[in-house]
Amino acid sequence: MGFLKSATAFLLAVFILRAALGAMFQAPGAAGPTLVEAFALDWAGFGTLVGLFWLPGLFLAYPLGLVARRLGDRRGVLLGLVLLILGAVVSAHAEDITLLIAGRLLMGLGTLLVILLLTKMVQDRFLGRDLFPAMAVYVLGWPLGIAAAQAALPGFVPDHGWQFPYQVAAFGAGVTFIAVALARGPEPRALPISNASGSALTRDEFRRMCLAGACWALVNGAYMVLVSFAPPMLMARGLGLAEANFATSLISWSNMLAVPLGAWLARRAGVAGPMAIGASLLAMLAALALPMADVGWAPFLGLLHGFCYALPITVFSALAAEAVAPERRARGLGVYFVWFYAGCTGCPAFAGWLRDVTGSATVPIFFAVVALGAALALYVWFRRDLARG
């Protein structure tokens, strides 16, 4: 019982949960062209289906942030997992696009509860420099779930149908429910003394939460576009289904080394900012080369992009903790996640629309590069704004 109450057990449950979320998100991408054909989707429709995973958060993140304390963190996360399982089961049994959309929206509602309250749980329990390694664990499960789903599941789709990724995702969420229920975790750390008063965000806090949320939205939006649209782009350039998905999965597998290394470096004074800027620029160059270089370079470019993209990811993910006083964190995260969900909903859909309009499989990749560049600009703005404050 002592282990179940430890920080290690809590972070292990967080890691498993985030991996399950990654597999949930990637279910349509793992089904790929088979899903598109089964439901007669165009690429804008496919991108919209991917983005629906985030749509409920666009409208409900802020209201949920207002009532989060009364709902209870652990209770809310477990309720979110129930909705995720239900949504995956509905999707797997869909016979028309309406049920497929309904299942995806149920998964999105569960994701909203899980991400908002899980983020608060981690930031309440780990403060100061301890936050970077905790956020590394928090972030790392997500790409691992996506990479595993992208590398392993497409090979089963021809024999087991487009439903198979959804079925696996539902099973993973069930395992996660048990892990979260058992791991009681450490108690929230005592909040530092603050001169902040009242429950409303200050104007500075509101602006900084908007900057942090928009930055994190575009960082994630760029990633989602790449892992969703790189496989069909590489197939259009001559790779087979398995080869294209393997090369794309390397974007996520490389995160396994880059995220903890980046968290370790970020704890060193003066390193976080230069690392975020330099690594992001290299990641943009690697993604830009992906549709332009010889297709044989795709695995290497996937690895290079994923490593450079993930190196500063804990720096970007920790911005919200710096933007607002701890006692108003739940309310601030409501603002933060409105931006996050807007970007995550809109980026894949817009990328799909760009592909349909231009007829080019490479345009979504270029859009992902632009999104990552915009995120970097918002990060610089945030740091300057915080320094002035």
Image: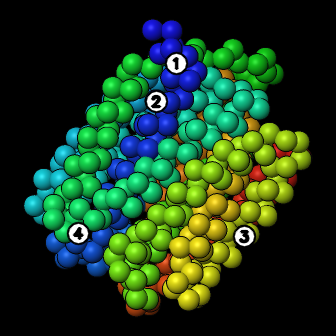
Disc on the earlier residue, 1 or 4: 4
User: Residue at label 3?
Assistant: 282
Q: Secondary structure at mark 2?
A: helix
Q: Are marks 3 and 4 in contact (CB under 8 Å)?
A: no
Q: Residue at x 30, y 70 (%)?
A: 32
Q: Inspect the image, locate mark 3, and give the three-letter code of the amino acid beneath it.
A: Leu
Q: Position of residue 322 (x, y in %)?
A: 74, 38
Q: Residue at x 52, y 84 (%)?
A: 296
Viewed as shown, does residue 312 lie left or right of 245? Answer: right
Dot 4 alpha-carbon crowd within 10 angstroms: few under 14, some 14 to 19, many 20 or more: some
Q: Secondary structure at mark 3?
A: helix
User: Residue at label 4?
Assistant: 35
User: Residue at label 2?
Assistant: 13
Q: Position of residue 61 (x, y in %)?
A: 47, 42
Disc on the earlier residue, 1 or 3: 1
Compare residues 262 and 128 and report the one nearer the observer: 262
Q: Are marks 1 and 3 in contact (CB under 8 Å)?
A: no
The residues tagged by marks 4 and 2 sit, at their Cα atoms, a distance apart of 31 Å
Q: Secondary structure at mark 4?
A: helix
